[in-house]
Image: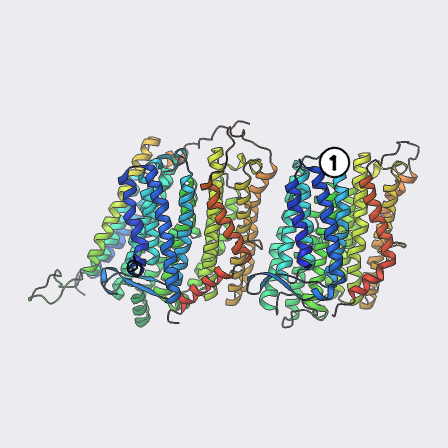
Amino acid sequence: MITPATAVFIPFLGAILVVAAGNRASRLRNHSLVATGCVNLAVLIVIALDRGSHAEAQVLLETLPGLRIAFHVEPLGLIFALTAGLLWPVTSMYAIGYMEACRDEHRTRFHALFCVAVGSAMGVAFAENLFTLFLFYEILTFSTWPLVTHNRTPEAVSAGRVYLGVLLTTSVLMFLLAVVVVGNFGDTLSFRPGGVLGSLGPSATTVLLLLFVFGIGKAAVMPFHRWLPNAMVAPAPVSALLHAVAVVKAGVFSILKISVYTFGFDSLESVLRHELIMWIPAVTILLASTIAMKQDDIKARLAYSTVSQLSYIVLGALLANQLAMVGSTLHITMHAFGKITLFFCAGAIMVFANKKYVSEMNGLGRAMPWTFGAFLVASLSICGLPPTGGLWSKWYLAMGTLERGQMGLLAVLMVSSLLNLYYLTAIPFRAFFLGGDVDRGFLENRASMVAALVTTAAISVLLFFFASDLAGLVTEIKT
Amino acid sequence: MDSLIPALENHLPILQVIVPLLIAPFCMILGSRRLARGIMVLTAGIMLAITLGLASLTLQQPVITYDLGGWAAPWGIEYRVDMLTVFILFTINLVHMLASVFCLGRQDGNLGTAARPAFYTAWLLCIAGLNGMVVTNDAFNVFVFLEISSLATYTLISCGREPLALLSAFRYLVAGAVGATFILLSIGLLYMQTGTLNISDLSRVIAERGSDRTIILALAFFIIGVGVKCAVFPLHDWLPNAYRFAPDSVTVLLSGTATKVALYVLIRFLHDLFGADFGFAEMPLDMVLVVTAIFGLLLVPFIALRESNLKRMFAWSSVAQVSYIVMGIGLGTRLGIEAALLHLFNHAIVKTAIFMAVGIIIARTGTARIRHLGGMAHRHRFASCIMLFGGLSLIGLPGTVGFVSKWVLVTAVVDKGWWWLAIPILAGSLASAAYVWRIVEIMWTKPAVLKPEAPAARLHWVEWLPLSVLAGLALWFGLNASLITGLASSAALGLLNPGG
Amino acid sequence: MSFPGLLNYWVALILLVCGLIIVMDSRNLVKKLVGLGIFQSAVFLVFITLGKKSDGSAPILDASVSVYSNPLPHVLILTAIVVGVATTAVGLALVARIRRAYGTIDEDEIDDRPEVEPEIVP
């Protein structure tokens, strides 16, 4: 029997397999890791094809009356789960190569926690109510802390402290408070199309919205974004899957899902000073892009770029119309494929050429053609240029702002895209066209890593042609 | 045999108290440590069985009364067992059972003078006194049992390895004796105005004649006196050192029973004796208790954060957690009491487990200094994981018992209309996250400070068995709390509507 | 109300406060116990007083007496005295052990001692 719960538990099962195999049976461990990822993807595809029959809540446990651990399938969660589920086996292959190249001693712990994190992301994706969402959100926070502090260096530990500090403070003080408010003043904690806040007045709705937007710290809306650049001390695969896809997308996905199913567009319309609140993510978009331009460390630059792109999705959620919702959902997927490629490339540059600063990358293009080629494609996708999938998500978002009549926000989106273009394409430009006289030989000697980054870049391009199917899926939601 | 069981059934309330009381001297008389340990565990088992027997009786008949020596109340001493009593009895006797098993594994070196059989006598007297406080329905009897358990507790604490255990026990003795004398004075004042000592009778008389200054004074003395025993925030001074210097098994026992019973007495007296109308409508008790609780749960975690000793840090955390229970009691509503009882049970099992894990690490390394903990997680995985799990529950993360009770508490404050209290409750959770995570960080990410112990210190079954039971209970009740919530809810209902 | 009136209660109150001050203020452990004794005695006094009735006789049935004192508080106080004695005994035993361990019964002197740290082998 394949249900959403299956998709949630398979990664946890994978974690047990990985621990059971351990460092001694490392081949078995690696194989079971990839196999778990593939099985999980297969399960997700079956669920996607049969989504109609899983729309009802599937209750696993009832902790207290009204507090249920339950899952269901709806388009937003399905797209998020498919994105993470498709990228997981690819990242697993990449991670196996990366960790071997780094001669890391704690690979078992690393891979096992990775599985737990993916499982929690699945839990977030299929959560049927706010309690389940919050439960898996917190498991995600705690399971990624050991990954951030993986190196055990003082910098890693202090970065881990910021990571946990910001995520826990925001989630306990604001997110949980908001859940409490919904639980006590809303109709139900469950997600219902059209929202569950019927009886709440406009000012309470406004406060609640702010609590959610800032309380879901994983969405990295400024000023609660500090944890994300800090988390970059983690090994590259963690930055790639978790801090470009699973963790941050769990955050923005939560905001999107809550705005669609807990508030509903009608409630969002009633929010006081709606225009002003929409400027919160808009300011984050601009500021983060500006900061990203100044970063020389490639992972820090990508991290700030992520902060900026996440706020596109938050903005889309706050715009409260169908076009923007489609744009936000597409952007979860498009940005995921683009950004994971960029992180894969950053990791590959680190492993193959031992370089981590943008200023050192002159002339590397000939030694690592695949890597920088993929980097260029992914950059175009992040900027929203054809022929990549990123075009469509930004297109829908722009249409969403127009439908609201927010020309200012449209300008923000455009300016930010130009900034993206500048600070991302500068990297392959340097690699291919500057300092080309140094001959370093061919450096890309780990097939699994190169294959992974080429795959994700290729999917970014493929998404250009299949975006309409995803958009069609999202429009199934009755708002 | 067939006639014996129904005969015993009628006497279960008194057996709950008198069995440990009568058996206790034998530990000393027989003079053998091995024998004394066996007797202790056996008695703990019998007591838990009696509690379960009482529980099954209360299912058929909500209130069981027992007249001591056949003297009818209000002249004689009456024992009274209802859902609330059973709830508390179950909590403390479960903890006692597991703590007894855990105590078997403590070596002589850890217990100091506890190698003597008399230690086990004191142990049984302590738990006998606590059980007595729960089942009795006579105000003066509560005082007597309080003193029996307290005197035994002072003795147990003084058995700690370090000489400061003596001073901690002495300070607890002074604080405890002052507290108990306040309670005695309160009982005297009540008797002065009502002429009775039976709690049900007292409540009836107070309701009939209304309150006056003397009864207000009695209430004030009672709150202060029992506050010392509960370690309510400003009156908690004795607790951290008493827990720290007591032998590990005694800390385990006390953290799950002593303060919990004192909190039970607080609930019982406020609602059954003084009456909720007097305490919460006429007197601003709700404000008093809630405000002290807010201070407790916000300030104490910061003291814990600066603490250098693992055991005392968790002792501070107990003071903070008591504040949540006091807040629930302070609300005075049915949901508030339900939340208080739920947190009382949840905190009892979680903190017992944590102190057991701490005890295991101390037994292996000989130190409880936090800065010596570096890398300990890789050496003592089981104990460390239990500590982590317990810590997550102290924070109150979803999926743990701590979340369940805090959720009910938040529902209770919203239900009373004091929804703003949710903010300090959540802030308190966050503050506890700080000290819990400080430990986790040191244990998991810092390099080892201590040389590895010479023999591979394997876990004995008396160590992992009680821990696993507690962890299993915590896990189950964290995910599916319906059973325990139902019990707490009907206990609270029984307290507020004794008739129906 | 005749002469003593509330005098007993006033005395009890003064003793109570004196005892409490001694307990809190003195640094000598034995003096603390003395203070505790005074404090408890004050409460006993309250109990004894409330059992007494004006012109009441000892509660022994006799045809010539019609007003009896209430014996119950006195009985209660017997129990409380026993408890008080036991508390003092345990306290004194602890003080004796403390003196053996530290050579002093002054709290300040004991607090001033540095804690002995277990040896650390890095």
| Residue B100 percent coordinates (x, y) | 40, 45
In this view, the residue in front, B96 or C19, is B96
Percent of width and height locating residue B63:
35, 66
Q: Residue B219: x percent and y percent?
A: 35, 61
Of B130 and B239, nearer the camera is B130
Between B432 and B367, which is closer to the camera in this rendering? Answer: B367
Q: Is residue B343 visible?
A: yes
Q: Which residue is mark 1?
A: A100
Q: Nearer the viewer, residue B317 or A3?
A: A3
Q: Quadrant of residue A364?
A: top right
Name the side, left or right, on which B500 lies relative to A50: left
Q: What is the chain letter for disc 1?
A: A
Q: Tell me the quarter of the picture where residue B118 sits.
A: top left
Query: Element at badge 1?
Result: helix
When asked about the image quadrant of residue B172, the answer is top left
Q: Amino acid at mark 1?
A: Glu
